[in-house]
Image (cartoon, rainbow, N blue to C red):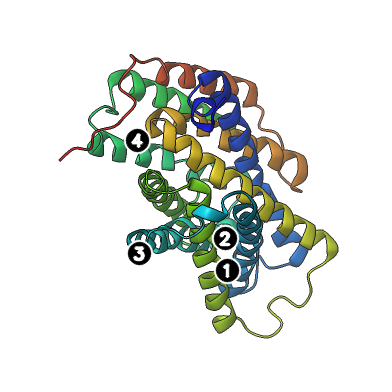
Amino acid sequence: MTVQSFLTKKITVIPLVIVISILWGSAFPVIKLIYSELGVESVSVPARIFLASLRFLIASAILLCISLLAFRNQLLVKKELVPRIIMLGFFQTILQYIFLYVGMANTTGSKGSILTSTLNFFLILICHFYYKDDKLNLTKSIGLIIGFSGIALANWDEGMSWTFKMNGEFLLILVGLVSAIGYFMAKEISREANPIIVTTWQMIVGSLTLLLISLVFMKPGDIAHISEKGWFLILYSGAISSIIFPLWYSVLKYNKAGEITVYKFIVPLAGTLISSWIVPGEVIPPALPAALFLVAIGIMIVNYHRKAPKDKEAVT
C-alpha cells in the first residue's frame, strides 16, 4: 500500500484523523500544566513566548532528524517555495502560538479548546470561496451547527466563565483564524513539496523567530528554573507537534480540507475531557455524554455527501 492510497482510504484516514485530534486536544491542558508548574501565568508575555519557542525547537529538531534519515533527497525545496514557507511559518507557528500561549494564560483549558475550534468555520469558508468542488451546502451547515452545539454543551458547567477578554478569549478566536489560513497555505504548498519537509522548515523558521522575540524582551528572572516535570511537559508538547502537524498536512494533501477538518470537532472534546482529568480545578462537564452524541451526529451529517472529483479546481 502506497502512502497516497493509505491516506485516501476512509478506513485508514478517519481513525488517523481521530488520533491526531485527540493528541491535539491534549495540548491545551498540557499548556495549563506547564504554566502551573513554572508559575508563568502571572508573568511576562515574553516568558510565555519563550515556552512556545522551546516547544517548536524540539518539534523542528525531531522533524529535521526524520527528514535527514527518510527524505534527504527532498530536504532542499525549490527556491520559489522559500517565501511561501516563510509566510507559512509566520501564520502557522509565530502568530498562532503567540496568540495561543498568551491567551491560554487568561482562560481555562476547556474554553481554550472550544474557541480555537473556530478554525473549522474559517477553513470551510475559505474552501467554499476558493474551490469549485468544496462548497458549503445546507447539509454541511446543519452538521456544523449540530456539532458546535455539542461542543458548547460540553463546555457548559458551573465553572465556565463566559466573560470575553481581549487578552484571552479574543486571542484564541484569532488562533482559529490564523490556523485556518495556515492549513490552507500548507495544503497548497504540499502539492509541490513533501508535507513533512514543508512542516520542518516552517517550524524551524517559526521557532527561531519566537526564540529571538522572547530573548529580546524577556527580563532576568522571568523563568528562573524549569523543573524535571516542566521539561517533561515541554518535551511532550514538542513531540506531539512533530507528529500531528506533518500527519495533518499529509492527510490534507490527499483529501478535501472541508471533509477532513470536520473531525477536529474531537479536539475540544478531548481537550475538555483531558483537562478535567489532569488540570487542578477543572472537572468533567455534566453534559459531556449528550455533547459527544451531538458531535458524533454532526460529524456523520457533514460527511454525508456525493462523491466529487479528487483534484480540486481553484476558482479563477
Q: Which of marks 3 and 4 is nearer the N terminus?
A: 3
Distance of label 1 from label 4 (alpha carbons): 29 Å
Q: Name the residue under label 1.
A: 49
**Residue 267 located left or right of residue 86:** right
Distance of label 1 from label 2 (alpha carbons): 7 Å
* Location of residue 172 in the rendering, given as x and y in whole percent from the top left corner: 48, 52
Amino acid identity at mark 3: Pro
- Residue 101 tag number: 2
* Crowding at mark 4 (Cα within 10 Å: few <14, some 14-19, many 20+): many
Q: Which of marks 2 and 3 is nearer the N terminus?
A: 3
- Secondary element type, mark 3: helix
* Location of residue 211 in the rendering, given as x and y in whole percent from the top left corner: 58, 73
Q: Which of marks 2 and 4 is in front?
A: 4
* Location of residue 97 in the rendering, given as x and y in whole percent from the top left corner: 52, 59
Q: Nearer the viewer, mark 3 or mark 4?
A: 3
- Secondary element type, mark 1: helix
Q: In which quarter of the image is residue 81?
A: bottom left
Query: Do tag 1 and tag 4 residues touch (Cβ < 8 Å)?
Result: no
- Residue 83 tag number: 3
Residue appearing at x 49%, y 35% in the figure: 251
Query: Do tag 2 and tag 3 residues touch (Cβ < 8 Å)?
Result: no
Amino acid identity at mark 2: Tyr
Above or below 276: residue 42:
below
